[in-house]
Image (cartoon, rainbow, N blue to C red):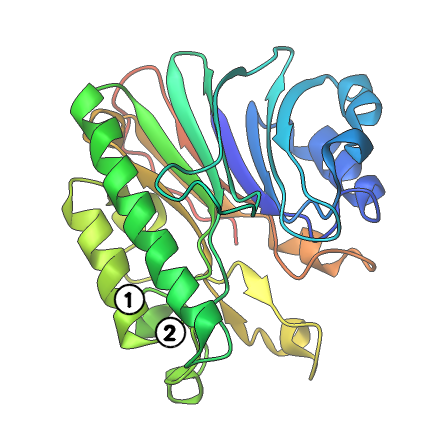
Amino acid sequence: MRIATYNVNGVNGRLDVLLRWLEEAEPAVVCLQELKAPDSKFPVKGIEAAGYGAVWHGQKSWNGVAILAKDAVPLLTRRGLPGQDDDLHSRYIEAIVDGIVIGCLYLPNGNPYPGPKFAYKLRWIERLTAYARELLDLEVPTVHAGDYNIIPTDLDVYKPERWIDDALFRTEVRDAYRQLIDQGWTDALRHLLPEERIYTFWDYFRNAFGRNAGLRLDHFLLSSDLVDRLSDVGVDKHVRGWGHTSDHAPTWIEVSDKPNRRTKYNG
């Protein structure tokens, strides 16, 4: 079962890229971020024509998340992250697909630092951490996938010294990510590939993609009952080179029915 996450950076403006990739990769589940479309403008007909059912949580011009499932409709369990009733950002959606709880998230960027956007980012991580603890207590297979807007370590950025005061790499943010993992979650890509330099995002400027000056921002956190079923991980880096495409590349994991330790990185 291939589970993918993809920040599409505008689902309608880049629908052709999304559909081309779905046809090529045929993932079983896809978590989308940064839809930049209200609920009424989500391109459900095009996605259904590609063979996918969908649930989504949209927002005009900004944010927005969705979960797609091949030949099925995800069972929606939550729209929005609990813990702040006045938060109107569409950044979290959750559904059950094939017995696995799929949490799709788009964590705030937080820039500029310091400032209110950075404070909001830290509060959002606190809310995610509290809710993630509740999910672990349920003892059901769970994946939290998406654009975390967090660079966890120096290995995950092309020049760490340039990012010290960026909200993606601030010490407070990386510490919060480690605290989340310490609850009992596993960073899937780092679990199988602890020493590989892997990027999932390349800026549009300064030929970042051509120079491979990237960042790892898109992560999968797995509950303990899925770790031994993790069989493969990869980044479809070539999609980032498809012309008018997102600055992120689709990132994916393979989860087997039974424990399987085969490892291959297709970056």
Quarter-of-image position of residue 263: top left
Do tag 1 and tag 2 residues touch (Cβ < 8 Å)?
Answer: yes
- Secondary structure type for disc 1: helix
Where residue 253 appears, as percent x and y from the top left, is 44, 36
Please give left or right for residue 251 compared with residue 194 in the image: right
Please give left or right for residue 238 compared with residue 77 in the image: right
Where residue 217 appears, as percent x and y from the top left, is 46, 59
Amino acid type at mark 1: Arg
- Placement of 5 over or under 255, stated as above or below: below
Packing grade of label 2 (10 A; few <14, some 14-19, many >=20) is: many
Q: Is residue 115 visible?
A: yes
Amino acid type at mark 2: Phe
Please give left or right for residue 11 compared with residue 131 in the image: right
Where residue 196 appears, as percent x and y from the top left, is 36, 61
Q: Which mark is residue 69?
A: none
Q: Which mark is residue 169?
A: 2
- Placement of 42 over or under 141, stated as above or below: below
Which residue corresponds to mark 1?
Answer: 174
Number of marks drawn: 2
Q: Earlier in the sequence, mark 1 or mark 2?
A: 2
Q: Is residue 228 visible?
A: no
Quarter-of-image position of residue 114: bottom left
Who's the residue at 68% across and 53% down the image?
Answer: 62
Q: Residue furthest front?
A: 86
- Secondary structure type for disc 2: loop
Who's the residue at 53% across and 36% down the image?
Answer: 4
